[in-house]
Amino acid sequence: MYDVVIVGAGPVGLFLACELGLAGSSVLVLEQEARPGSVWRAMPLGFRGLSVASADAFHRRGMLRDLLVASGAGDYPVADPDADEAAPPARVGHFAGVPLDPGRIDIAALPFRLPGPAMEPVGTSLEAVEGVLSERAAKLGVEIRRGVTVSAVTQADGHVVAHAGDETYAARWLVGCDGGRSTVRKQAGFDFVGTEPRLTGYSMLATVADPEKLRPGFNPMPTGMYLRALAPGHLAVMELDGGAFDRSRPPGREHLQAVLRRVSGTDVTLSEVHFASTYTDRAKQPTTYRRGRVLLAGDAAHIHSPIGGQGLNVGIGDALNLGWKLAATLRGDAPEGLLDSYTRERHPVGAWVLDWTRVQVATMSPDAHGRAVKALVHDLLGTRDGTTYAYEKLSGSGLRYDLGDDHPLAGRLAPELRLVDGTRLGDLLREGRGVVLDFTPERRLREAANGLDERVLYAAGPARDDLGLDAVLVRPDGIVAWAGERGFEQAAFERAAGRWFGCAAV
């Protein structure tokens, strides 16, 4: 029997498998596709953007350099990690197809921004992400079986079974990372609630007879939006038709051409369509991410429009949050309620991304209500506050879990704190353990940290920029569990250590 069976070998399932493998858990990943590569995972159709928070997750597990190389970005960090100050963001993204100006970002409103290798979003592909994660999973002893279609999931006392034809796979826990049409979610009886679609989206690779008739980039239009990407023939179209066409029949050339003409307002001609798929902005999530010994992550836990490119990033956040908590549960040293905090922390993030995409669809709506929303949103995004707000959301730097601690850094992604001797927080997090950084001259937390045994790493010394802190406790997922300012009370550290690591510090 395995510790964990993960259904789905996409980026989320593989990232989670790596997290569990890093902790020494026995993991089996089941994937229905017989081979890892496909046209939908390679460039250009497989293009994806990793947010700053996702790039940071790869950095803190020692995979960012490999990912950049696999993505064709070169063998270099995303930003200068040795800079004295963090550079202003060079890229922000877009909202409902409207590019955001990085020059409007209020740097002073980002008080915990420190230099590090992962300071900008990363353009990559599903193929590159999955390749890097698959190689790491293999090194960690994770078993991946392809060509296995899970058809049923059953739970019994102390274990759960995945059924695939005549084969069964038993584990102490099972995680569904099998996409928006998740079999695991349906078989395990999760409630799945939300809103029905307002649009049908199309992604295609085609030969365009007259590409000059389509403007490059994102183009919001009265009845939807179209994107003419950099790669020749790579097009995306969204038509506000109530989701009428999705899954009704295969998208043929004549239909795709008619939709593109209606949305773009041109008489553009598609000579040939090589590949095409459809999607909608249906937005739903389960009421909980756990039922018994079955959990959900990634698209299995939240479906929505791909507008804004947040799906992959939220899924990686799910895997990062769940991995160390499930591993501690398997070891038997998890404090009470630790695994339940996965739903408590990640469900609101899933709800946010559903609303984030809903409002972008509403902004694109061609009726009077949509035009009013669009005018207001565009005005707000034209301000420093509006652009800064959007940057915090798109980059992931605005994420904050409610940990019941009013310190402004608690619950946030830890900045890349650096000791004067060159030790970086990102390097310390590579082992998947918690980290105690002690900046006090007398090493106040040395003895207390030793009481946490191997669950945390302890590092001490003066920091290049300590942000006014004397010490900080960071969870394995890079979230600040506790921050101690000058003259902190050690009892506060011990309470936080006990809450997240299940043992009382000395």
Image (spheres, rainbow, N blue to C red):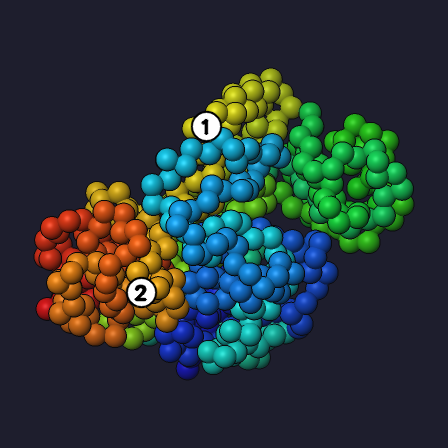
Label 1, label 2: how far apart the Cα atoms are: 37 Å
Mark 1 or 2: the one toward you: 2
Q: Is residue 496 left or right of residue 87?
A: left
- Please tell me which residue is depicted at 72% across the width and 44% down the height of the picture: 229
- Across and down, in percent, residue 60 comes to 42, 63
Left or right: 316, with 400 as reference point: right
Between 245 and 459, the one nearer to me in the picture: 459
- Secondary structure beneath dot 2 equals loop
Q: Are marks 1 and 2 in contact (CB under 8 Å)?
A: no
Residue at 53 percent across and 64 percent down: it is: 65
Amino acid under label 1?
Answer: Arg
Vertical comparison of 479 with 355: above or below: below
Vertical side of 20 occupied by 228: above or below: above
Total marks in image: 2
Q: Residues within 10 Å of mark 2 (few under 14, many from 20)?
A: few
Image quarter of residue 198: top right
Residue 297 seen in the figure: no
Give whichever of 136, 235 is nearer the camera.
136
Label 1, secondary structure: give it. Answer: helix
Per the image, the residue denoted by label 1 is 384
Q: Residue at x 21, y 61 (%)?
A: 438
Quadrant of the rendering where the N terminus is positioned: bottom left
- Which of the numbered marks, if any, corresponds to residue 255? none
Q: Could one spot residue 492 in this view of the protein? A: yes
Question: Is the residue marked by circle 1 packed among few (<14), some (14-19), or many (20+) residues within 10 Å?
Answer: some
Residue 38 is situated, as x and y percent measured from the top left of the image, at: 70, 64
Q: Identify the amino acid type marked 2.
A: Asp
| Label located before the other in sequence (1 or 2) | 1
Checking the image for residue 421, the label placed there is 2
